[in-house]
C-alpha cells in the first residue's frame, strides 16, 4: 500500500515541477532574451516519476543575430 502512495506522491511532485516550469514559460513569454525551458521526466525502477532535468531551449540562429545587433 505504501508503494502505491509513494508512486502517487512522486508523480504529483514531478508534475508540479513541470507545471511550475510551464507557468514560468508563460509569464516570461514576452521578456526579451528569455529562453523557454523543458522538463524531462523519467520513471523510477520501483515505480513513480522523477524530474530528470530541466533544459533551456535556445535557437542558435536567433542568438547569433542578437550578437550582431
Image (cartoon, grey):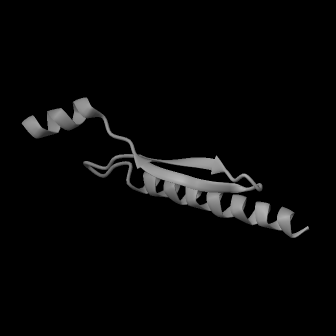
Q: Quadrant of residue 1?
A: bottom right
Q: Residue at x 44, y 51 (%)?
A: 25
Q: Quadrant of the C terminus?
A: top left
Residue at far front of view: 45
Residue 69 seen by the camera: no
Q: Residue at x 16, y 33 (%)?
A: 65
Q: Quadrant of residue 57?
A: top left
Q: Quadrant of residue 28?
A: bottom left
Residue at far left of view: 68
Residue 28 seen by the camera: yes
Q: In the picture shown, does residue 65 fall above or below 40?
A: above
Q: In the picture shown, does residue 52 fall above or below 9?
A: above
**In the foreground, 23 or 43:** 43
Q: Residue at x 63, y 56 (%)?
A: 50
Q: In the picture shown, does residue 65 fall above or below 45?
A: above
**In the foreground, 29 or 15:** 15
Q: Residue at x 69, y 53 (%)?
A: 44
Q: Is residue 36 left or right of residue 31?
A: right
Residue at far bottom of view: 2
Residue 68 in the image, given as x and y percentages of width and height: 8, 35
The number of callouts visible is: 0
Residue 35 in the image, given as x and y percentages of width and height: 34, 46
Q: In the picture shown, does residue 1 fall above or below 51?
A: below
Residue 52 in the image, given as x and y percentages of width and height: 55, 52
Amino acid at each position: 500500500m505504501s508503494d502505491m502512495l509513494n508512486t502517487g506522491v512522486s508523480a504529483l511532485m514531478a508534475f508540479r515541477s513541470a507545471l511550475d516550469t510551464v507557468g514560468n514559460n508563460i509569464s516570461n513569454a514576452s521578456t526579451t532574451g528569455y529562453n523557454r525551458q523543458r522538463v524531462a521526466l523519467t520513471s523510477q525502477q520501483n515505480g513513480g516519476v522523477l524530474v530528470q532535468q530541466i533544459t533551456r531551449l535556445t535557437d542558435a540562429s536567433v542568438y547569433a543575430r542578437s550578437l550582431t545587433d
